[in-house]
Amino acid sequence: MTQVENRKIERELGERLATSGFRFTSQRRCVYDVLLHKLDHPTAEDVFSRAKKAMPEISHATVYNCLDALVECGLARQVHLERGATRYCPNMEEHCHYICDECGEVFDVMLPTDGALMPKPKGFQVDHYDIAVHGLCADCARKKK
């Protein structure tokens, strides 16, 4: 990440946090960086272990609080995959999740922004999509052959 990109992310993070009544903290920046660095829909525990490498003093409670703040201010969304732990996704564009039932990897696939994805009841206004498609990723499908 370039210095310009880094400043832009920090500025956006600060503005979004402030608009939602949160302060910008180094812990929130660290947790947000973890989400942006590897777009693999980590659980809170995954985020904690990655953040701990960059900030050894960070606690579980702080990570959970940071994730809640990022969700509340619209910089991340919670992803609930059946009975598994909640995962976090910084992709705020409308998309669906393709989930490999073998290895658990989650892939984002962008959706049309005009709401033309599927028929809807007359007069229904779509707020957001929450679509999960299950199957096998290319690697797991190849291994099954």
Image: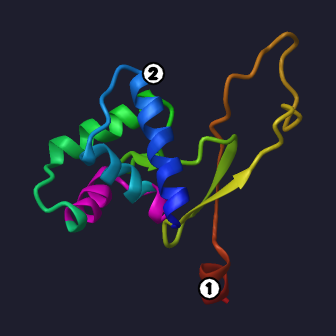
Quadrant for the C terminus, please: bottom right
The type of residue carrying mark 2 is Thr
Distance from Cα at disc 1 to Cα at disc 2: 49 Å
* Residue topped by disc 2: 19
User: Could you tell me if residue 77 is visible in this image?
Assistant: no
- Camera-side residue of 102 and 5: 5
The type of residue carrying mark 1 is Lys
**Residue 43 located within the stretch drawn in magenta:** yes
**Quarter of the figure with residue 47:** bottom left
| Left or right position of 4 against 93 | left
User: Could you tell me if residue 124 is visible in this image?
Assistant: yes
Q: Position of residue 105 (x, y in %)?
A: 52, 66
* Residue topped by disc 1: 144
Q: Position of residue 84 (x, y in %)?
A: 38, 51
**Quarter of the figure with residue 61:** top left
Q: Position of residue 136 (x, y in %)?
A: 63, 70
- Camera-side residue of 72 and 141: 72
Category of crowding for the residue at label 1, using alpha-carbon neighbours closer than 10 angstroms: few (below 14), some (14–19), many (at least 20): few
Region of the chain picked out in magenta, as a range: 36-52
Coloration of the structure image: rainbow
Q: Helix, strand or loop at disc 2?
A: helix
**Residue 8 located within the stretch drawn in magenta:** no
| Left or right position of 10 against 91 | left
